[in-house]
Image (cartoon, rainbow, N blue to C red):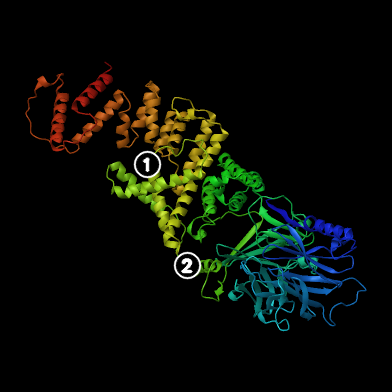
């Protein structure tokens, strides 16, 4: 199971021992049983009521006299505090405390115990109170009605000083929501009292709704009302200054007309029938900082043979409806659907069977046990799933889950390596295990290239939190569309209506949401970055290099400077020495590709990231490309480490082993993956690949790989080959086969390193070709001065005379031009040696 929960808070561990200590202290003082007296058999009355925005947990219990006691657990200090005791035998239905802990709002109902008299006002089922608790003082009745009332204080972000006005939401079972404004003042020192408690101003902010959800973290109220049998989702945003706005409304294609009344995240509701709740619809709204807005919905279901649920991607204008069979699932797992907001760390592998309540910030509350969990995906469990699953669709889903909850390549950066805490090291270890698994299973998937998917997805998730609208600017997958059927699941995708925004000025989350909606509304062109422009420009530059014609030096220097910045950025993030000899040579072709990608990606971001500083964009580009290269290095290093290769591998005068062939294979797969995406490789990659190819492949296979572009000959690799190998017949054949496949400019340089008649012949041929390419025959004397030649071989003598004449002319016209001491005399000597060899003399 990849989903795990760990308890952040437990009533039995975090509250009950404190209550027992309070009782013991009270008895030691001779006070007998007091308000804090909790006996063993009273533990059942201890339960969580609410969790406020700051994480503080409000709970209640009954003492031995039946009095209702309210307590608070501070999640920061891990301390408990007694708030208030209500000396009547009633049941607490809902409770909330303001941020300063000076006011407590509570709704109470008649105790369910038989024979109890009615403690409430005549004719009322629910009593809603507002209590001054700093210190305990006046109690004001807000409501005494025959319907349930939920209460919730607003929590502004202002923490520097207490606000003179508190705002309290009252949510009625009669389908209306009111906001009370409570003015407070300090009297007699620190005593806080309610001003004008006889008349508290109130606003009715919603009516006739059938469903509502409170987002405690973002202080947003979502609710659905029915208009002409249509479900209309609306949202109210509350601000730090206590003002509020209706932000949007959007129709949802769901049926709520017969669903009754349901609230989400307004404290713990212990009064709903759990069996009925399991057959009730599930509906939750989820958002995140990137401007996404999703509604997860599952309709009522009489039988649980299969489940259907929908996800409305409001910010993208479409929905996906999934149907899956549950025939092989245990009965205790089919009590209902809970939508959870997941986080990104590992926890114990255990889920409770009781109904769960999903809260903001990946929190999950089990009201039955009084435990507050943090829901996360387990990296180690995902790794096991990745290793054991057979379906490509499951491998891809698992890989993306692992990378998204780990934020991809962040775990490879230096600052993570330096942290010593065990949890971080464990997560880093799990991420490196994923890389190890990929390096060992590059052919495990048939529907997609595993290396491509890992590189693209990891790079995407590594910058996900840094770039707004990243899903529109960068690809998150190497697969554009998934057309393969997923066994046991049917999927229907439909277009949905876009929200009607009710305000015209946006900040923060709302600005990003509006940007997402504008993108969908106006059907802008496909924004995803691709390297097609880089491919064309790079090919042009390489072609110019081969012909000796290169555009302005400043342009090329700027591109190479970009590459230097990428490599510096990459090396700064990796403080540990690398196992493989990468990033240690020039490799101008890869540096050109790297620099061009920097230029193009920077232009791409500048076009579409409005309002972001140019300097920040440049750094994001460097980070993204650095992470691409770093991932490639780590895949290769994982294989290098597994096969225990050493530095002697870098010499040509050794034989290939099974370990070297395995590394050569993974490098070939990396090359295939990056070639189709046209991604740069770390400088030194092609040199190492060629060295291993020479070690592991027979000559005809080696030459085939070179001719087909699988192996790219670099100047560094060929230079090392010429120096490392002696001139045996086998090596001569290899060297000559390599030299004739080199580009002319590199070939001329390499030939001068090989002291051999073959290389002299090649140098001579190149020299003659260069001299004669613009030669125009001139009239000359028919008689040749034989005295100037050591041999009487007239064709050669005549040819050398022509070359000498051209050299003399060129020297007179271009006195500074030299050709590495190659002249007609050198050509003559090479020609004679070559003829002698051919004749076998």
Taking depth in this image into account, of 455 and 298 the one nearest to the observer is 455
User: From the viewer's perspective, is residue 21 above or below residue 85?
Assistant: above
**Label of residue 523 in the image:** 2
Q: Is residue 509 above or below residue 555?
A: below
Label for residue 821?
none
Left or right: 501 with respect to 753?
right
The answer to whether 829 is drawn above or below residue 223 in the figure is above
Residue 218 % position (x, y): 62, 67
Q: Quadrant of residue 802?
A: top left
Residue located beneath label 1 in the image = 588
Q: Depth check: give the residue in front, 724 or 785.
A: 724
Q: Nearer the viewer, residue 837 or 760?
A: 760
Spot occupied by residue 238 in the image (x, y as percentages of width and height): 61, 72
**Name of the residue lying farthest toward the top:** 841
Q: Secondary structure at mark 1?
A: helix
Location of the C terminus by quadrant is top left
Q: Is residue 259 visible?
A: no
Q: Are marks 1 and 2 in contact (CB under 8 Å)?
A: no
- Please, what secondary structure does the residue beneath circle 2 have? loop
In the rendered image, the vertical position of residue 634 relative to residue 763, given as above or below: below
Whichever of labels 1 and 2 marks the residue nearer the N terminus, that label is 2
* x 65%, y 54%: residue: 487
Q: Quadrant of residue 771?
A: top left
């Amino acid at each position: 199971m990849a989903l795990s929960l760990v308890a952040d808070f437990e009533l039995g561990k975090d509250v009950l021992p404190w209550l027992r200590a309070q009782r013991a202290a009270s008895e030691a003082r001779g006070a007998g049983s007091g308000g804090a007296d909790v006996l063993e058999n009273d533990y059942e009355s201890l339960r969580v009521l609410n969790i406020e925005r700051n994480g503080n947990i409000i709970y209640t219990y009954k003492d031995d006299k039946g009095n209702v006691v309210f307590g608070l657990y501070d999640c920061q200090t891990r301390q408990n505090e007694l708030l208030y005791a209500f000396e009547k035998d009633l049941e607490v239905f809902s409770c909330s405390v303001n941020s300063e802990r000076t006011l407590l709002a509570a709704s109470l109902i008649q105790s369910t115990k038989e024979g109890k008299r009615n403690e409430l006002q005549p004719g009322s089922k629910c009593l809603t109170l507002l209590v001054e608790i700093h210190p305990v003082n006046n109690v004001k009745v807000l409501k005494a009605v025959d319907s349930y009332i939920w209460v919730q204080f607003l929590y502004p972000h202002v923490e520097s000083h207490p606000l003179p006005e508190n705002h309290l939401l009252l949510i009625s079972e009669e389908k209306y929501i009111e906001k009370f404004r409570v003015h407070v003042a300090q009297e007699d020192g620190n005593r806080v009292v309610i001003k004008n408690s006889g008349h508290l101003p109130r606003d009715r902010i919603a009516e006739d709704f059938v469903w509502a959800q409170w987002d405690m973290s973002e202080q947003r109220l979502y609710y659905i009302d029915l208009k002409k049998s249509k479900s209309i989702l609306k949202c109210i945003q509350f601000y730090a200054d206590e003002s509020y706005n209706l932000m949007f409304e959007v129709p949802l294609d769901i049926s709520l007309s017969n669903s009754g009344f349901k609230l989400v995240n307004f404290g713990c509701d212990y009064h709903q029938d759990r069996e009925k709740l399991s057959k009730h619809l599930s509906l939750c709204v989820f958002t995140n900082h990137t401007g996404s807005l999703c509604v997860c919905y599952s309709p009522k279901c009489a039988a649980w043979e299969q489940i259907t649920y929908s996800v409305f991607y409001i910010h993208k204008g479409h929905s996906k409806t999934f149907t899956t069979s549950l025939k092989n699932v245990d009965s205790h797992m089919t009590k209902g659907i809970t939508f959870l907001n997941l986080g990104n760390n590992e926890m114990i592998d255990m889920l409770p069977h009781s109904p769960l309540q999903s809260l903001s910030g990946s929190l999950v509350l089990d009201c039955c046990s009084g435990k507050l969990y943090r829901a996360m995906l387990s990296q180690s469990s995902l790794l096991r799933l990745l290793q054991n699953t057979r379906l490509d669709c499951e491998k891809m889903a698992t890989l993306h889950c692992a990378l998204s909850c780990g934020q991809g390549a962040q775990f490879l950066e230096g600052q993570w390596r330096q942290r010593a805490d065990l949890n971080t090291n464990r997560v880093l270890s799990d991420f490196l295990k994923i890389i190890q698994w990929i390096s060992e299973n590059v052919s495990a998937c048939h529907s997609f290239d595993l290396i491509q998917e890992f590189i693209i997805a990891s790079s995407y998730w590594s910058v996900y939190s840094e770039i707004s609208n990243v899903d529109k600017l960068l690809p998150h997958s190497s697969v554009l569309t998934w057309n393969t059927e997923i066994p046991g699941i049917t999927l229907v995708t439909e277009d949905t209506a876009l929200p009607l925004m009710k305000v015209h000025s946006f900040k923060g989350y709302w600005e990003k949401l509006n940007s997402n909606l504008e993108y969908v509304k106006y059907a802008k062109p496909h924004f995803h970055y691709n390297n097609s422009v880089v491919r064309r420009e790079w090919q042009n530059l390489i072609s110019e290099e081969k012909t000796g014609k290169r555009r302005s030096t400043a342009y090329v220097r700027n591109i190479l400077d970009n590459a230097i910045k990428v490599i510096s950025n990459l090396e700064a993030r990796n403080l540990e020495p690398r196992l493989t000899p990468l990033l240690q040579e020039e490799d101008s072709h890869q540096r050109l590709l790297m620099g061009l990608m920097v230029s193009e990606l920077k232009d791409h971001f500048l076009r579409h990231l409005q309002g972001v500083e140019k300097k920040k964009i440049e750094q994001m580009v460097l980070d993204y490309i650095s992470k691409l290269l770093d991932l490639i290095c780590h895949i290769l290093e994982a294989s290098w480490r597994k096969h225990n290769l050493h530095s002697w591998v870098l010499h040509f005068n050794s034989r290939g082993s099974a370990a070297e062939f395995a590394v050569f294979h993974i490098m070939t797969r990396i090359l295939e993956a990056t070639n189709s995406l046209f991604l740069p490789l770390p400088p030194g990659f092609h040199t190492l690949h060629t060295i291993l190819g020479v070690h592991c492949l027979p000559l005809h296979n080696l030459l085939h790989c070179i001719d087909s572009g699988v192996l790219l000959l670099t100047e560094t690799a060929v230079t090392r080959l010429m120096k490392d190998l002696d001139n045996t017949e086998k090596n001569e054949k290899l060297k000559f086969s390599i030299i004739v496949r080199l580009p002319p400019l590199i070939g001329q340089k390499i030939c001068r390193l090989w002291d051999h008649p073959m290389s002299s012949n090649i140098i001579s041929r190149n020299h003659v070709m260069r001299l004669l390419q613009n030669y125009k025959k001139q009239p000359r004397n028919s008689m040749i001065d034989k005295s100037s030649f050591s041999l009487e071989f007239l064709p050669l003598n005549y040819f050398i005379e022509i070359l000498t004449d051209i050299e003399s002319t060129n020297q007179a016209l271009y006195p500074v031009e030299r050709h590495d001491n190659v002249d007609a005399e050198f050509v003559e000597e090479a020609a004679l040696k070559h003829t002698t060899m051919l004749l076998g003399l």
